[in-house]
Image (tube, coloured by chain):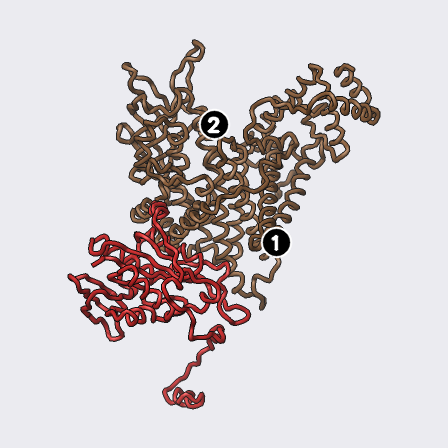
Chain colours: A brown, B red
Amino acid sequence: MNVNSFLALSRAFPRGKNRLVCHAWHLEKQALRVQQRRTIRTHSRSLAYAKDLFLGQINKAEVFPYPEIGSDELEEVKQFVAPVEKFFNEEVDSAKIDREAKIPAETLNGLKELGLFGIMIPEEYGGLGLSNTMYARLNEIIALDGSIAVTLAAHQAIGLKGILIAGNEAQKKKYLPKLASGEHIAAFCLTEPGSGSDAASIQTLATLSEDGKHYLINGSKFWISNGGFADIMTVFARTAVEVDGVKKDKITAFIVEKAFGGISSGKPEDKLGIRGSYTCEVSFDNVPVPVENVIGEVGGGFKVAMNILNSGRFSMGSSCAGMIKKLMELTSEYAVSRKQFNRSLSEFGMIQEKFALMAINAFVMESMAYLTAGMMDRPGVPDCSLEAAMVKVFSSEGGWICCSEALQVLGGLGYTKNYPFERYVRDCRILPIFEGTNEILRMYVALTGMQYAGKVLTGKIKEMKKGNIFMAVNMAGKKLRTSLGASVDLGLTGKDGVVHPSLESIVDEQLVLKRVADVLINLYAMTAVLSRASRSISIGLRNHDHEVLLANTFCNDAFFKNNYSMVQLQKHSPENNDASIKKIAQAVLENRSYICSHPLERTF
Amino acid sequence: MSGRVLVGVKRVIDYAVKIRVKPDNTGVVTDGVKHSMNPFCEIAVEEAVKLKEKKLVKEVVAVSCGPQQSQETIRTALAMGADRGIHVEVSGNDYETLGPLQVSKIMAALAKKEDAQIIILGKQAIDDDCNQTGQMTAALLDWPQGTFASEVTLDGDKIKVVREIDGGLETIKINTPAVLTADLRLNTPRYATLPNIMKAKKKKIANVKPADLGVNLTSKLEVLRVEDPPQRQAGMKVETVEDLVGKLKELGKV
């Protein structure tokens, strides 16, 4: 039987599904006898766990069991953690750093001596050569001071990362040793006053000199952490390239030394939080950069930038978890001793809720961060950009809420500078903004996933049209399975689960994408906690029953939230206020203010 | 002269941890509690490493007596600059009853075996506050001792030690070989930097059993009961000295 008429039949007789089931079964059995089971892949397999979630597939093998490190490595990690914790407890005066908006030189020196400036630089270049997992672990402690955390991250997570992941041997040999010891500090220069989220629109220019030996960089960058004292900067600028004979302007990544001259920086920005971190404008005036300092290929800078940013994101999970765990200690001391109405605060439900919130959030963030780090540490170059983005979104928002709730427990006291809570709240506010705003990352998660799913499904349809009977049977079987289970018409998919061609305009449907991203983030979070708790039970970790409790509570909550998002995504769902939201926004923005008449107004 | 310094390091519950007594009152809770090197032992290691950096001694050997986890403490000493470590394996019941007498016997045996010139220990451990091991070790070896040292200077084959005593400071000169115990103000211990921790991985830790050293670990002490100190009672304010004397008589204190 020809597949196409088979399909036509299935379309024409929706109610005849049952009859077709029997037929399909028959055919399936025949097909099985005839050929081996063969899965269709449209592109090479990288660790695409999150991407496959968009296809309704859970690749258990990729996330179960929870990643483990060898016992030697674990011993080493514990050894590393002790002096760093000691340093942060004894030598770091966070209140002073925040008050004076400066990290003292002795503190920076102490950090350099500890080796914290070259955590991921390989040993051969003078660094510690630690894995992503170890980096995440150390970040739990470094995050206790926001300014230090940002200064170190700007240096090694993004500032010198380009050289590390895309640089050639000569560049690594030349620059990494001094960067590892902290003698030179790095900065990442991508953002410009006119180009923030829209990184591809930067205007800084790099023109090739006449003798072809130098590029001259002109332009100005904004919001550059470590901008005032960085010795080595990764600068992104537009260069003229020829693509198939057509002259184009593409972004290139350069290693620029302050010593090249022509670089000036503005005064440090007066920020709400992370005040000890030096953030300023950096201007480039005909800065000569030798052609050997191009990172990767000329014109390939955008990809380098994205790879750099993607590789550092996941650590926000462990940073936030470390911070929340500290806050839990400080807050619980207070809640247990403070008494009102003759009872300690810890006996009141609304206070208890806050502690549960902090515990669950810390648990989820840890689980997600180390799951992602474990994936990234596997051999090969796994693409975990989606997973890292999800960790970042969840952790930044969770961190902000938990800091606020921790402050709330202390009430008025929490609001004063006598306690560190207000500083944690201010330091946390930057998290949803930098390293890719949460809005952009949600779009990235939703669109990348859909694009992937679209490609795979389109590939499957193509195969079906070619007459691959087995494919058709597979699809019909799947469709049946979904319809027998709960099925929701998202209005996003047409027949056979294909992503509808009208979705070219989906890019503009941000509110839809936001919900899709939220669902996916919750799914990944649930995967992480389930994987971790399963391992804890099987190996009998201390307090594993508490982990099970946290995991179940979170999954319960996330499940209902996801269902609600899915319900809102349905076509013509009454729970969906998107159309009204758009109308309101339009009216307000047209008028540039609130437009209602005052309630006290009269018309007569 | 071997130029070898033996430093004893003890793994204790971290100073910042809130101690809790076990429900059966046999001891304190140690399971899952953060442990680290005894602060006075850190000062001892720092002093030994300083002597080596000044080239006054040739080798620093860190010693710890305890279960498997004591190796972590030795590793920290190695990361601070010690050259090699010796782990004397003591576990189970023996470890529960391990006290200054047993440790000093072990240290004395090791000093002879390793031909040590100086033994530096912390003045006391923050878990038992015994302040006995250094003194006992010196006695067993019949060596001079410089305890509560706040300053140590090597002078040929003698050591000048400034000691912190109740009345102030006392300076003594003792012959080597000798036993020193470190007091708080002797020095400020360095942080074990991460690069040094990595280098320390290559340093050796030898495993020794007390029986190999011919040491008998039986204790002459038995812990009967461990309990929390009594809760602080509120104080009382009095108006005059007569009232104070009256109240003291009432409480039977005078």
Asked whether residue A241 appears in the rendered view, the answer is: yes
Q: Position of residue A240 (x, y in %)?
A: 38, 16
Q: Which residue is mark 2?
A: A198
Mark 2 closeness class: few <14, some 14–19, many ≥20 residues within 10 Å: few
Q: Secondary structure at mark 1?
A: helix
Kind of residue indicated by mark 2 = Asp
Q: Position of residue A28 (x, y in %)?
A: 76, 24
Q: Position of residue B89 (x, y in %)?
A: 42, 60
Q: In the image, is residue A526 above or below residue B6?
A: above
Quadrant for the N terminus of chain B, please: bottom left
Q: CA distance from mark 2 to mark 1?
A: 46 Å
In the displayed structure, does residue A314 sit left or right of residue A502?
left
| Residue at position x 50%, y 69% in the image | B21
Q: In the image, is residue A416 above or below residue B172?
A: above
- Figure quadrant of residue A596: top right
Q: Which residue is mark 1?
A: A545
Kind of residue indicated by mark 1 = Asp
Mark 2 or mark 1: whose residue is earlier in sequence: 2
| Residue at position x 61%, y 27% in the image | A450
Quadrant for the C terminus of chain B, please: bottom left
Most foreground residue, A138 or A272: A138
Q: Secondary structure at mark 2?
A: loop
Q: In the image, is residue A333 above or below residue A394?
A: below
